Amino acid sequence: MVSLTIDGKKIDVEHGTTVLQAAEKLGIWIPTLCHHRSLTPYGACRVCLVELQWPRGSSIEASCVYPAADGMSVRTDTDRVVRTRKIMLELLLARCPEVRAIRDLAGHFGITRSRFPQQDSDCFLCGMCVRVCNERMGVGAINFLHRGVEKKVSPPYDAHSPICIACGACQVVCPAHSRSVEFDRLTSHTPRPIPSEFDEGLSQRAAVYIPFAQAVPHKPVIDAEHCIRLQTGACGACQAFCDAGAIDFDQQDTFREIEVGSIVVATGFEVFDGRQIARYGYGRLKNVMSALDFERISHASGPTNGEILTSEGQPPESVAIIHCVGSRDEHYHEYCSRVCCMYSLKFAHLVKEKTGAEVYNCYIDMRTPGKGYEEFYKRLLHEGVQFIRGKVAEVTDVAETEEEEGKLVVVCEDTLLGLTRRLPVDMVILSAALQPGADSDHVARLFSLSCSQGDFFLEKHPKLAPVEAATEGIYLAGACQGPKDIPDSVAQGAAAAACALSLADRGKYVLEPITSEIVPERCSRCKTCITSCPYSAIVFDEQHDISLIIEELCKGCGTCVVTCPSGAARQKGFEDVQIYAELDGILT
């Protein structure tokens, strides 16, 4: 801590605190136009000047960038300070006579007009936009050009873009902002935090935001549910600050029908919600987190800047990773999710690398069937990661020994030692199952897709046609067809794209040799076959009062033949006489 005096008032502040910040804590007002709490101090406007008094003399310094020092004496209202501020305000008023913030501040010091030559500019080079672009967005799309009086802010090559350039200005000025950014001067209301979906709710976002750094297209979106303008008609700050004019609140949703020759279904997956297994404490106990939670806090762009910290803000000394949460479990999902073992090993490596903590991997069976995967598993054995074979019974915070006080206790079986263990740890990571998306049923009905075990979409043939659906022209890619890791998803996506291109290149496809047909004389017009057809290949002809089969869509599954009460539907190549002949041949 350092101790200093400001206008006769003493205060103790931490090292690195600026004079301006120290004055704010004392309630002493120092005018400033370029300073912002969420940005690195810049000292551009020079209005926040104060006089520092030392035993050997005094000096005028910008308070927003000058660090507080022990024994420092600061005066904010001396004649020298006021005179210098007036000169700076006259210079700014001459450059930007129509900027209200400058006019109001100049009026506070009794300045109504400047003695310097008037200019016609609305930018007084505070540098906030440049700092936002560099510090907040990491883009560097704008900077200062030229020097001296010709200095100005401009995008690269001094050419404005007619469309959104993803500068992030709209995100920064949005009043419904993240709590990590303070904008007291924009609104007097306390903003309501909006949890970031990408960070699993561990941080907040604005109502206008770029979903994540690698988003394609890399453009901001507006959350209509939280946008003040769309909800009340007020605000519109983001539109006012968008120099490219890329924000249009009057735009309406439009729906377009596009005829296509092929469809690639790549709807992905969802992660099993650990709250469904209450005994693991997810959502109830602190420091019990999902795999996605840990993925975000361990990432350099995450809410903790890549530091692995507990809810108390300290690095953990011990971590337990529970495998197969929700998978290989007859109560939830019986299938193996394939990727859990490997990302659990990755988490163990990251914890060891960044914190050196003791890591326990509680697994059922270690499954590492990939290139270099087994080698990575052996590497972690040499790094000192402990592997415990057995299912975890529960995670609790009830201590039975002094060692367990203040810890999470993982109660698990160890089948290799033949006993039950209690592991006191600081953090628990749940490696949850991969499951189909919540709208997979709707997608399946929309595209007439069949589902296999676990409600993943069923391919035409598991070996000969792993990316094709039963319906011609529809292809499956990624984890919507079954749990798979990144290399398999990339390979399947490339295969699906190749199949779609192959079909487009041919311009035609071969019909199934076995299809159904309707015998007009027997059709009773009940339309049962229409509702039972999984491929929507049957329509009703109102003119002839009969059901018709569309051969291009029919796959010869025979569902209509079975359900037709009058026997009007039959399958080509599977007539009764043909089936009887086959049976005669077999029995002979």
Image: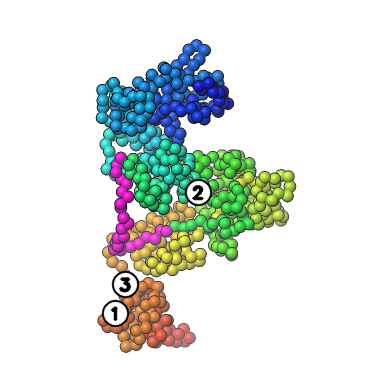
Instruction: Name the mark on residue 201.
Output: 2
The image shows residue 503 at horizontal and vertical percentages of 31, 62
Q: Please report contact status of discs 1 and 3: CB closer than 8 Å, yes or no.
A: no
Dot 1: element: strand
Residue range (magenta): 243-267
> Marks 2 and 3, how far apart in space?
48 Å
- The answer to whether 241 is drawn above or below residue 44 in the figure is below
The mark found on residue 552 in the picture is: 3
* Comes first in the chain, label 1 or label 2: 2
The mark lying in front, picked from 1 and 3, is 1
Element under disc 3: loop
Q: Nearer the viewer, residue 304 or 93?
A: 93
Which kind of residue does numbered mark 3 sit on? Glu
* Camera-side mark, 2 or 3: 2
Residue type at numbered disc 1: Asp
Q: Earlier in the sequence, mark 1 or mark 3?
A: 1
For the residues marked 1 and 3, what is the alpha-carbon distance in whole angstroms? 17 Å
Compared with residue 58, is residue 238 higher up or lower down, i.e. above or below?
Answer: below
